């Protein structure tokens, strides 16, 4: 099925709001990881797993799933790598949907 | 039976729900979102107020989705509303627990738009068929007694929340037995159909017409005062005689009705008291010569 809604300006605005939320949330996620507060990191991953796909951002859901799983087993190294990779992906996506 | 389908979403994650709401509204649904709930009981109250056709509920919210499911399914007037869990949880014991609790289906997160819309469309089609069978009178295709009783209770509860009164009109076709005896029951059926179509076409969309049984009908007129209701019924009485004729063989059969009125809360707050009051008004109208409307008096 085509994700035709991705071209709708109304939906693109929703995506931008979602991306803003993630940009603002990421420093807290990093801080939680530094503090070994894995439960909060897990919640972030869980929520993003559920929400990303709704915006047509399936990769975000996949990142969320991996972050949730790594946080559940407290795999700090995997989480650090995932968050660095996700940070880059998020920046690219913000750029992609930025109002030109 | 459905006009525009109302979907109630119980979910506290704004960023999860925003695209879901967008997709559902683009598909033509009316969407309400409740993201702050005190407890499962307040969810029950809000579901009652919104009167949705379908509920989508997150499991991992506060209060817990299972608690909300339990309170909705324990309410006699809400338990038939299709209830769907939105969840990322895929554990079999949780799914079994949900099915045993009365959940109709699951939408798995991350949500796929096309699957979600197909699932809701399928459930609403099934629900429409079910409600058709439960709540519609097969002959006249208006609401039946079961629906009327449900709606009467709902109106009374709404009054306690919003203070809106309503008028109850009981209508009975005059000399209907003579029609049946003279022309046969098939002709009587055509008279009943013509009568209900006429009434349906001449009342507000918010008014609810239902068949009580035989040639007796009830009309619930939302947010109406007794004077306005009498004017409306008098208009119906006059126009029915002029405008509606049932052709049967070579004859044109015209007919009239009588009506009794009760007003909520003026005449009582109990459903049976209101019905009895309207019935007494109807009796008075019949005794006074038929083809007229009378206000009922509460009590014996």
Image (cartoon, coloured by chain):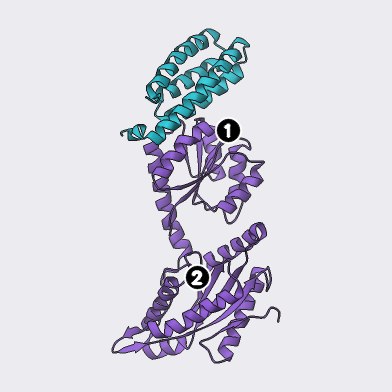
Can residue B112 be seen here?
A: no
Residue at disc 2, secondary structure: strand
Residue B216: image tag: none
- Residue shown at the point (66%, 46%) measured from the top left: B41
Residue at disc 1, secondary structure: loop
Number of disc labels: 2
The residue that label 2 is drawn on is B210
The residue that label 1 is drawn on is B60
| Residue B67 percent coordinates (x, y) | 62, 41
Q: Is residue B296 above or below residue B58?
A: below
| Residue A22 percent coordinates (x, y) | 51, 22
| Chain appearing in cyan on the rendered image | A
Query: Which quadrant of the figure contains the N terminus of chain B?
Result: bottom left
**Do the residues indicated by labels 2 and 1 lie within the same chain of the protein?**
yes
Say which quarter of the image contains residue B179.
Answer: bottom left
Chain B: what color?
Answer: purple
- Residue shown at the point (56%, 63%) measured from the top left: B151
Front one among B102 and A39: A39
Q: Earlier in the sequence, mark 2 or mark 1?
A: 1
Can residue A30 be seen here?
A: yes
Mark-to-mark CA distance, 2 and 1: 41 Å
- Subunit ID for the residue under disc 1: B
| Residue B173 percent coordinates (x, y) | 48, 83
């Amino acid at each position: 099925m085509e994700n035709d809604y991705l071209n709708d300006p109304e939906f693109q605005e929703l995506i931008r709001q979602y991306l803003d939320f993630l940009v603002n949330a990421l420093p807290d996620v990093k801080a939680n990881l530094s503090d070994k507060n894995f439960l909060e990191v897990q919640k972030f991953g869980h929520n993003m797993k559920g929400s990303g796909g709704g915006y047509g951002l399936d990769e975000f859901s996949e990142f969320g799933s991996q972050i949730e799983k790594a946080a559940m087993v407290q795999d700090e190294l995997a989480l650090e790598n995932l968050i660095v990779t996700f940070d880059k992906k998020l920046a690219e996506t913000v750029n992609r949907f930025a109002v030109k | 039976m459905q006009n525009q389908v109302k979907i109630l979403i119980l979910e506290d994650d704004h960023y999860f729900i925003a695209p879901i709401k967008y997709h559902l509204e683009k598909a033509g649904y009316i969407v309400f979102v409740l993201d702050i709930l005190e407890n499962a009981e307040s969810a029950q109250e809000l579901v009652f107020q919104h009167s949705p056709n379908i509920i989508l509920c997150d499991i991992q919210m506060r209060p817990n989705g299972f608690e909300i499911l339990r309170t909705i399914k324990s309410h006699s007037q809400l338990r038939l509303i299709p209830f769907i869990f939105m969840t990322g949880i895929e554990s079999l014991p949780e799914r079994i627990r949900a099915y045993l609790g009365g959940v109709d289906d699951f939408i798995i997160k991350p949500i796929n738009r096309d699957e979600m819309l197909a699932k809701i469309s399928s459930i609403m089609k099934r629900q429409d068929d079910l409600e058709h069978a439960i709540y519609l009178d097969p002959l006249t295709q208006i609401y039946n007694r079961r629906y009327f009783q449900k709606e009467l209770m709902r109106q009374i509860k709404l009054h306690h929340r919003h203070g809106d009164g309503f008028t109850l009109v009981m209508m009975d076709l005059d000399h209907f037995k003579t029609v049946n005896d003279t022309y046969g029951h098939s002709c009587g059926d055509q008279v009943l159909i013509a009568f209900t179509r006429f009434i349906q076409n001449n009342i507000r969309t918010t008014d609810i017409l239902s068949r009580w049984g035989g040639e007796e009908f009830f009309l619930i007129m939302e947010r109406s005062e007794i004077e306005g209701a009498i004017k409306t019924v008098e208009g119906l009485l006059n126009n029915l005689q002029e405008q509606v004729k049932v052709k049967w063989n070579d004859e044109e059969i015209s007919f009239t009705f009588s009506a009794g009125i009760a007003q909520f809360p003026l005449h009582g707050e109990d459903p049976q008291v209101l019905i009895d009051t309207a019935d007494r008004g109807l009796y008075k109208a019949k005794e006074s010569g038929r083809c007229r409307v009378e206000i009922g008096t509460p009590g014996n």
